[in-house]
Image (spheres, grey):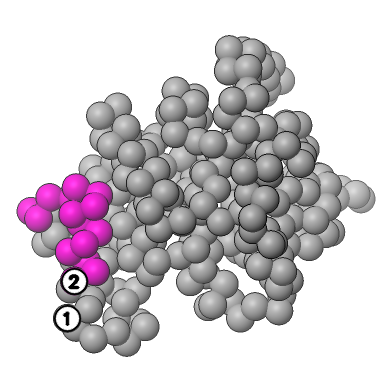
Amino acid sequence: MPHAHLPHAPYPMPQLRLEQVSLFTKLKTQLQGYPILQDISFEVYPGDCISIVGSSGAGKTSLLRLINRLIEPSNGKIYLENQEYRQIPITQLRQWVTLVLQESKLLGMTVQQTLAYPLLLRRLPTQTIQQRVNYWIEQLHIPSEWLGRTEVQLAAGQRQLVAIARALIIQPKVLLLDEPTSALDAATASSLMQVLTQLNQTHQTTILMVNHQMDLNQMFCGRLLHLQQGQLLTDQTASEIDWVNLRNNLMQADSQAAQEWI
Ligand SMILES: Nc1ncnc2c1ncn2[C@@H]1O[C@H](COP(=O)(O)OP(=O)(O)OP(=O)(O)O)[C@@H](O)[C@H]1O
């Protein structure tokens, strides 16, 4: 979709490129693989803020998992800055492209330990670790009284904020978020989206997020990918989207899917 890339004309190459990516799962009872994603191609440029929408089962989470290389495509290729994914050491790839899942675990650590841990692994000096932890706590408005708490002492939305801070602390180039605001109340969701937008604009951190909350998509995202039954139906900039029509389509698709399940 060339129109979606016009604002990025000065960039010589895309940051991420998916080239005819398909994903099939093969169940023992099936002769043929079951298609989860089919023939997906798109490019992402530094500083893009992209929402991925689609009805339940459309393949949104699978797409994020492919881009984080938690799973491999059955066909097609994924590139980061022109390097094919399989050529990039996995630890390096995950430093550059970080995924925050919907249900994040803090692995029994306190919030303070959770945030410091990725930096300890990278053997950064104690003072740098503390400075970076403090910076992201402040950016995401995480209250200092949470720092000594473990995940059982945090509500789902609070855990989600900490998991996002833990992802940002390693300063990824691309941040992948799976329904980051679903467990948050409206005010916290909106303030998180503002922080993410600011991050996107000031640090050029690229954001790809699955988000069902269309009002937030409309307010904060510059581009939207619409998946339907594993295919990329549209790839549009925010100004090109007919939001009313899109909401109706998604609601209709979800109610049809629900009827098929009954
Ligand atoms: N490991 C797997 N094995 C078999 N089928 C899978 C696997 N992972 C996903 N699927 C199937 O692939 C399809 C897409 O799943 P995915 O979770 O990517 O969709 P989604 O758009 O994120 O849905 P939701 O909005 O409900 O989270 C679904 O039909 C799902 O059941």
For label 1, count other residues whose C-alpha is less than 10 Å away and answer few (under 14), some (14-19) or many (20+). few
Instruction: Please tell me which residue is depicted at 31% across the width and 77% down the height of the picture.
Output: 119
Q: Quadrant of the C terminus?
A: top right
- Position in image of residue 227 (x %, y %): 69, 35
Q: Residue furthest front?
A: 10
Dominant SS in magenta:
helix
> In this rendering, is residue 158 above or below 164?
above
Q: Of residues 116 and 234, which is closer to you in this image? A: 234
Q: Is residue 132 magenta?
A: yes
- Residue 52 shown left or right of residue 256 in the figure: left
Q: Secondary structure at mark 1?
A: helix
As shown in the figure, which amino acid type bears the numbered disc 1?
Gln
Q: Quadrant of the N terminus?
A: top right
Give the residue number, with chain letter if any, for mark 1.
Answer: 127
Give the residue number, with chain letter if any, for mark 2.
Answer: 131
Q: Of residues 183 and 50, which is closer to you in this image? A: 50
The reply to whether residue 226 is in sight is no
C-alpha span from label 1 to label 2: 6 Å
Instruction: Please tell me which residue is depicted at 54% across the width and 36% down the height of the picture.
Output: 222
- Position in image of residue 59 (x %, y %): 67, 41
The reply to whether residue 77 is in sight is yes
Q: Of residues 249 and 200, which is closer to you in this image? A: 200
Q: Which residues are magenta?
A: 131-145
Q: Residue furthest right?
A: 31
Contact? badges 1 and 2 (CB < 8 Å): yes
As shown in the figure, which amino acid type bears the numbered disc 2?
Gln
- Position in image of residue 155 (x %, y %): 23, 43
- Position in image of residue 160 (x %, y %): 33, 48
